[in-house]
Amino acid sequence: MTQERPVVVTGCSSGIGRAVVRHLLGREHTVYATARDIGSIGDLASDGARILPVDLTDAGAMRECVRHVEARHGAVWGLVNNAGYALTGPVEELDMDQVRQQFEVNVFGHITMTQLVLPGMRRRGEGRIVNISSVASRFTLPGGGCYHASKHALASFGDALRYEVSPFGVRVSAIEPAVVRTRFIVTAVRLLTARGPGTGAYASFRDALADCYARVQRTPYRYGAVSADKVARAVGRVLASDSPGPRHVVGAAARLTVGLRWLLPGPLFDAVVRARFPVPRQEGRS
Ligand SMILES: NC(=O)c1ccc[n+]([C@@H]2O[C@H](COP(=O)([O-])OP(=O)(O)OC[C@H]3O[C@@H](n4cnc5c(N)ncnc54)[C@H](OP(=O)(O)O)[C@@H]3O)[C@@H](O)[C@H]2O)c1
């Protein structure tokens, strides 16, 4: 058994998870890349990562992943809770099964992985948990109720955990980007438009939301989007630090948004959001 610093990353089939794995390879870590379909991460194995199947809705797969790493290294040293997606749409029309699924992946899956790795980290007397959160954990946009709620929940659980596990040498940090150039928005638009063109009271709102997301996907630089590599470097810095800070806002657009949220009184922030983002309009009223 080797006393290395094994790091487990969830959601490595694309985007930030994949970039984090590539960034950590060759840096004093044994990197465990995980995905629902390990066929999607075969190239990471060729590059030196060890690959394991993990679906964040499958408790057995999560247990088996941690057991596998502990059998070889004694304990997981680092966990990057990354996998996630955005369910968007007007609150009144959200499908509750989809809402539960959103929380299964974005919140409960991360809590489960965290609970599984903590006994080993405490035994070892050190560890790092990095939650890929978002500026979405600091405020909420119209149409984003479900996704933002999941990121607020992840932030709260991470904050509590930070106090609870630091006496055992375990550090907990959140990474908070704004828009990142990944397929994240494509998935969000696919989910939003799956029920076809908008009908009913929120028809034009749904269409406007989909247009807004598509615009961000088409012209990411206008929205200050950062690369997945930039987020991966922030994760790398947190893992390399002996005393990483609690929350790391990544990118100028993310810092500006968080700054505005702090500076502007609530009603003024609301007015900015209403002016800049789609909101429902009652048909027939001006
Ligand atoms: N992109 C952004 O603008 C942005 C901004 C702030 C924060 N974030 C956060 O960054 C994280 C990564 O997103 P990304 O931008 O890299 O998006 P992405 O490219 O769409 O990657 C999402 C990853 O999550 C995985 N995933 C989804 N459901 C899963 C499940 N049940 N079990 C295990 N893995 C699952 C996906 O795997 P499959 O291939 O199997 O679907 C994929 O690997 C998310 O937590 C997201 O909230 C993203």
Image (cartoon, rainbow, N blue to C red):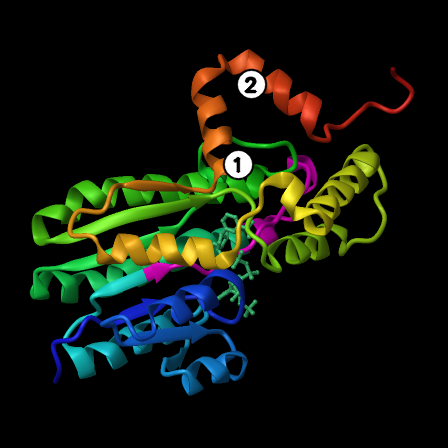
Looking at the picture, does residue 165 appear above or below residue 152? below
Q: Which residue is mark 1?
A: 253
Q: Label 1 to label 2, Cα distance in Å? A: 16 Å
Q: Quadrant of residue 215?
A: top right
Q: Quadrant of residue 155?
A: top left
Q: Is residue 130 at all visible to an observer of this figure? A: yes
Q: Give coordinates of residue 139: x percent, y percent.
A: 50, 30
- Which badge, 1 or 2, is on the more N-terminal residue? 1
Q: Give coordinates of residue 168: x percent, y percent.
A: 9, 53
Read off the magenta span. 80-99
The amino acid at mark 2 is: Phe
Q: Nearer the viewer, residue 76 or 249?
A: 249
Q: Nearer the viewer, residue 135 or 99?
A: 135
Q: Nearer the viewer, mark 1 or mark 2?
A: 1
Q: Secondary structure at mark 2?
A: helix
Looking at the picture, does residue 27 appear above or below residue 211? below
Q: Nearer the viewer, residue 281 or 125?
A: 125
Q: Secondary structure at mark 1?
A: helix
Looking at the rendering, in which quadrant would you find the N terminus?
A: bottom left
Residue pictured at 19% horizontal, 60% vertical: 118
Q: Is mark 1 within 8 Å of ligand 1?
A: no
Q: Is residue 104 at all visible to an observer of this figure? A: no
Specify whether residue 87 is painted magenta: yes
Q: Are marks 1 and 2 in contact (CB under 8 Å)?
A: no
Residue pictured at 39% horizontal, 81% vertical: 51
The amino acid at mark 1 is: Ala
Residue pictured at 72% horizontal, 28% vertical: 279
Residue pictured at 26% horizontal, 76% vertical: 30
Q: Give coordinates of residue 61: x percent, y percent.
A: 38, 75
Q: Which residue is mark 2?
A: 269
Looking at the picture, does residue 261 appear above or below residue 211? above
Q: Is mark 2 within 8 Å of ligand 1?
A: no
